Amino acid sequence: MAKADHGGRPAEGFGATAVDGVRTRLRTTRLVLWLIAAVLAARQVAAVLATPRGERLTDLETWVGPNGVLHVNGSLYDSTRFTGTPFSGLVLKPLTRSAEQALGWGWTFGTLLLVVALGLTAARALPQPVSRRTALLAAPVAVSLLMLSLPVRDTLSLGQTSIIPVLLVLLGCFTVRGQRTSGLLIGVAAALQPTLLLFTPLLWCTGRRRAALATGVTFAACTGLAWAAMPHDSSRYWVHHLAGAGLGGRADDLANQSLHGALLRLGLDGPAEVALFLTLGAAVAVLALRRAVRCFRDGRALLAVAITGCAAIVVSPTAWQHQLLWVLLAVVGRVGTRASDRYVWPVTVVLVMTLPAQLLLPDMALLRPLRDNVVLLAALAAATAVPFLSRSSPYYRAPLPVAYAPVAPARFRHLPLLPFLRRVLSRPNLLLELLLLRVTYAAYSQVRLAATGGSNSAGRAEAEEHGMQIYDLERTLRLDIEHWVNRTVVGIGWLREFLDQYYTSFHFVVPLTVLAVLYWRRPGDYRWARSALGFATLLALVGFWLYPLAPPRLMPTLGFVDTVHGVQDFSQPDYGTLTALTNQYAAMPSLHFGWSLWCGLVIAVLARRWWVKALGLLHPLLTGVSIVATGNHWVLDAAGGAVVVAVGFGLTYLLQGPRRPASTVRPPGRDLSPRCNSVEGRAR
């Protein structure tokens, strides 16, 4: 079968060699991906076991440790530290005899094995048929994503059991034979996590009625067994706490990503909040189940399971971070008719499930409701709103291709052009660009904050020493004009106010405006300019890390006046090292000047009118004056900023080829891809 895949005849000669080469590359890639998954798993084990005893596996210690709630003769829920169902407590009770072993290597490695099993099961559940590449690479990619995800990391660090219900559902839906066995596994999962009973109507409506009945019977049997063994605890859980509501942390805590938690964070409370939660939860459940049934009948069973799991997150009274793994499974859904749109949904899901919310969205009052509920919104979107493509859609397997500009020749024989930087003639997806921009800026901020010399005091001493080095070098080169410029500007009120305002206001506004205009009016040149800016910023981060530098205003013996921030308090030993937003010693190279120079060069190259070019070049000139006059940078900092921008454009030219002529830019509103033109022709 493998030899007859192409053309229906055995591959011979050069064809056989090419096929063998592809297979070898796939096997090598698969091995590398499995090595990455192993490294990630080892990293998670090291992170857990390196944590001091008493700070790791805290939830498990709370349950089965020497003083855990499962040892106590009273109710499991007296302290609200145990949030599982009574059946969970019944299952965990035997572990109390081997708590010491369970709280160490055994529990951690057991959880890792469950994660690997979950990844393998999810990879096998992909809609068939799949390509050979997908069949080989899906499992290691799935395991790696699971290892990186916040729910799995949280499960490992806390010693939680939330992997088990997800794995039981996937095994019941895709692995075991027989509907009764399938229903048995899903019923046990629902006994551990009651909102998973949503899978019962999914099974019923998709023709698996024996499995649905078995799920309900198993759930009732497990719950009844726990009720018989622990009647008081069962009464408290199911009656007084309404299936776990009110157990654990505060329901309005940010870690609770359910609809109930979001409504509480918005200020709603009491009977009105409960009524609204029940109404909206019922609506979400109905919409999600309808979508899941359609997906199941369309052959996308894994997506149907993910949608139902996302609905279970939304309608649960409490959905803590370690219980949110269902959102990651929704990455298998395909969205968008264009190839450039195909990556938006999976990238969004991966970022939401692997990065903290504070890295995805800035801490602004306007965005706070979105930031506080980002995982809930992703689950809600997957369950009710995201327009997943049907397998019957012509774009499911063959989206409209991206129209690329002609490939430029490589600059050097041994340094090829980067395929992912190829120039396209259409605009990239805006949401994907915004996500890329936000994550890049978050990484940029984290590096600036980390480059402090190991501690605040050590960072300050090193930065001041480097400041004296720069100052001495400038005096040798006769470039030490900072003190004269600073003192001159301080004596001219209107000039001081103008430069202060220019320094604080235009650093982000102008680059973002240039990028926005290019994205809308010159999409063919947008990627060229964005790549150059990205390379320059990455090089600057290396400079911040290797050479922390005190700006003139933070050199206490040189007499500079900080015109922007006011009088400095140098009596504080850690003054100036860090603020809430940035590292004040990330001065070399100056990105204030570098980004302004990038703006000036891009405008000068692309603008058609001479006065627009002149305004563009005026911006880096005014920025250079403002950073020196306000005491925020040395002259050599600006020179460093110019160097990284020049290298950024050079790397773009080297790895992407020369900027393509303006005549090849695609007019807005048209798609030059042959497929699109043929589709439009048929429509006419």
Image (cartoon, helix red, strand yellow):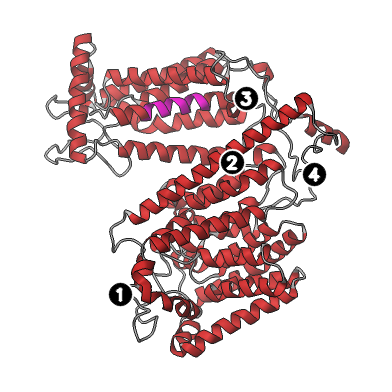
Left-right relation of 655 to 80: right
Please identify, in this view, whether the residue under mark 1 or under mark 4 is nearer the observer: 1
Q: Residues within 10 Å of mark 2 (few under 14, many from 20)?
A: some
Mark 3 crowdedness (10 Å alpha carbons): few <14, some 14-19, many ≥20: many
Q: CA distance from mark 3 to mark 2?
A: 29 Å
How far apart are the alpha carbons under marks 1 and 3?
62 Å
Question: For the residue labelled by badge 2, is the local secondary structure a helix, a strand or a loop?
Answer: helix
Q: Amino acid at mark 2?
A: Arg
- Residue denoted by label 3: 423
SS at mark 4 in the image: loop
Q: Which residues are magenta?
A: 530-541
The residue that label 1 is drawn on is 66
Circles 1 and 4: CB atoms closer than 8 Å:
no
- Residue type at mark 4 is Pro
Of the two numbered discs 2 and 4 on the same chain, state the one appearing first in sequence: 2
| Magenta-colored stretch includes residue 537 | yes
Q: Look at the numbered discs 2 and 1 and tell me whether their residues touch, using CB distance below 8 Å.
A: no
Q: Quadrant of residue 211?
A: bottom right
